[in-house]
Amino acid sequence: MPGPGTFGPSSLPASPRCWKLHIVRQLQQRDRRQKTMFLDLVEAYHRLLEKSDLLAHFTEKLPPELPNDPVHLPSGEEEARPVPDSCPSARGLQEEMGGGLARSSWSCGEMAYQVVEKNRALSAQDGLLEEQRGRLAALEARARELEEMRQWLAQRVAGQQDRITEGKEAYDTLRAHASHQQGALRQLEEEGRELVERLVRVKMQAAEDQNYRNERIDRVKQARLSKELKKAVKKTVNITETIDPPAIPEPPPRKQDLLEVEACEKRWKRPFRSASATSMTLTRCMDVMKGLLDFRKRRGHSVSGLPEARYPSIPVRGVSCLPARAQDVQEAHHSEVNAVCFSSNSSLLATGGADRLIHLWNVVGGLLEADQTLEGAGGSVTSLEFEPSGCFLLAATYNKAAQLWKVGESQSKETLSGHTDKVTAAKFKLTRQQAVTGSRDRTVKEWDLNKASCSRTIDGLSYCNDVVCGDHLIISGHNDQKIRFWDSRVPRCIQVIPVEGKVTSLSISSDQLHLLSCSRDDTLKVIDLRANNIRQVFRADGFKCGSDWTKAVFSPDKSYALAGSADGGLYIWDLESGKLETRLYGPHSAPINAVAWCFAGTHVVSVDQGRKAVLWS
């Protein structure tokens, strides 16, 4: 039962009873701990008291004079010693024992104090030990968790290794299958290439046969027309009889006429080139003779027989005057200027640069006056060309497209997109509404401007840096140091001329008989298009091609070749003598990228990498 002043187990809630029991246990524990520390001291004190009482008891019983025999203490702890002759009195011995007792008490106190200090240090060490044990338990728990995690990760690694092994086996199987499929694909590609080559040869042979038959028929018609003209000259014609002379029927060619043509061919022994090159003079003669008889004049025809709309007028080219001095200097663009060209009337100039802008300038009184800015190029402008009629402007850009502007409008009219890399050249063809572009995606594309669609893609085999166009001829200059010739009527390259250096630009003469190329070997080359060989090579001390898009041009009358150098100078060569005619230095302090010679032959414009456009006269 609980004693007085205490409560029963049901009188208080569980929580007060718990903390009270805890306090009682703590007190009992402290009592036991302190009692344990003082047990040795208490026992020593009790032994000391016992010895003191025994000593006092023996002192009272001692006689006044003690014998000299040694006295043995009953405790047996001290050795026998001789008793002096003069023994002190009992009071002296008692005082001496009291002093020893006092000293013993002081020693006991000192020892008790040391015991207390040691117990305090022991308590601190116990607390530290408990803390270390708690940390050890936490670390052991963490170690168990990490061990479990390691086992789980090891299981995952084993599973991943199994999956990797399975994937590697599947990959090896697929790789072997892919190698087999690639071998089959290469075999099929080779077979397809052989079939395409056979088809091309067959078509080429058919085209040559057809051109040969057409040429024979034209010659037969020419012979028959000559005979009819001779008869007509002998016949007297009355102008008042009729307004329209009767049309002369064209009977089919006779076998005898064909034999005569073949005999003429054997005498001439002229190598076959193409229908357009062979029958050009004959066609013009026929047109003139038919005009005398007031026949209906026929237009030019392509191989397919469909009429091609040509430009009504070709720019009139004047006698070229050598430039002597810089007449005007303009900050044309915000960054380097890449392209420049004149319109057919020689009064409008276009410049294009890396700032994605095209500026139009009027040449008035020997000065350049800003006229219009064309925006929306989408990339650096690399090439510019006016349509021969001067109504449209075609630009090549680094935005993988070429754009067509109508002069007077600020927004582009058409965007020719289809290349997969930068477009480096864009030129009009001689037939209306057709254009050609060259790109760094190793292709040359022909475009129908009416539909803004690609009509043909030519694989150029290398980066194309520039193109020019003839009647049915497309010429492209490439990064692999070659100039390639393509015929619009033949699906393959018809001629390749190697040059020593990357081709940076091409320029065709006004009569389409000569081609001027500029290359990175710091030379200009004139190519005879009739013989397809290099006729002249121009080089000069100090001349250096400044970039992969440096442009060189013929003069309008094909008397000179003009190019800009990396040192900021203009170099002009005489085509007749093959020597350097003049070297001009002026405002240019950066490499010259492009030059243009107006069709009238009076002005030259050069643009450089330092944003300048310079007018020379």
Image: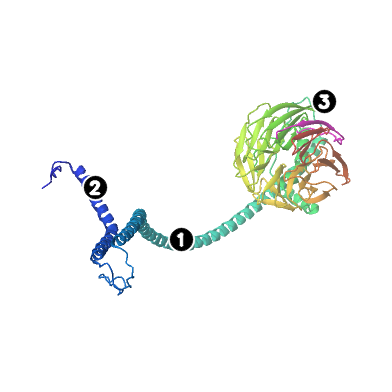
Which of the 4 image quarters holds residue 432? top right
Q: Residues within 10 Å of mark 1 (few under 14, many from 20)?
A: few
> The C terminus lies in which quarter of the figure?
top right
Which of the 4 image quarters holds residue 444? top right
- Which is closer to the viewer, label 1 or label 2? 2
- Which is closer to the viewer, label 1 or label 3? 1
Q: Secondary structure at mark 1?
A: helix
Q: In the rendered structure, find residue 365 and report the number of the disc placed on it.
A: 3
Q: Does the segment drawn in magenta span residue 329?
A: yes
Q: Which residues are magenta?
A: 314-334
Q: Nearer the viewer, residue 588 or 247?
A: 588
Q: Earlier in the sequence, mark 3 or mark 2?
A: 2
- Which is closer to the viewer, label 3 or label 2? 2
The residue that mark 1 highlights is 171
Is 164 located above or below residue 305 in the figure? below
User: Is residue 373 in view from this perspective?
Assistant: yes
Q: Residue at x 66, y 51 (%)?
A: 462
User: Is residue 133 in view from this perspective?
Assistant: no
Q: Does the segment drawn in magenta span residue 89?
A: no
Q: Position of residue 407 (x, y in %)?
A: 69, 28
Q: Position of residue 2 (x, y in %)?
A: 12, 46
Q: Residues within 10 Å of mark 2 (few under 14, many from 20)?
A: few
Is 535 located above or below residue 328 in the figure? below
The residue that mark 2 highlights is 23
Whole-angstrom CA distance, mark 1 to mark 2, is: 74 Å
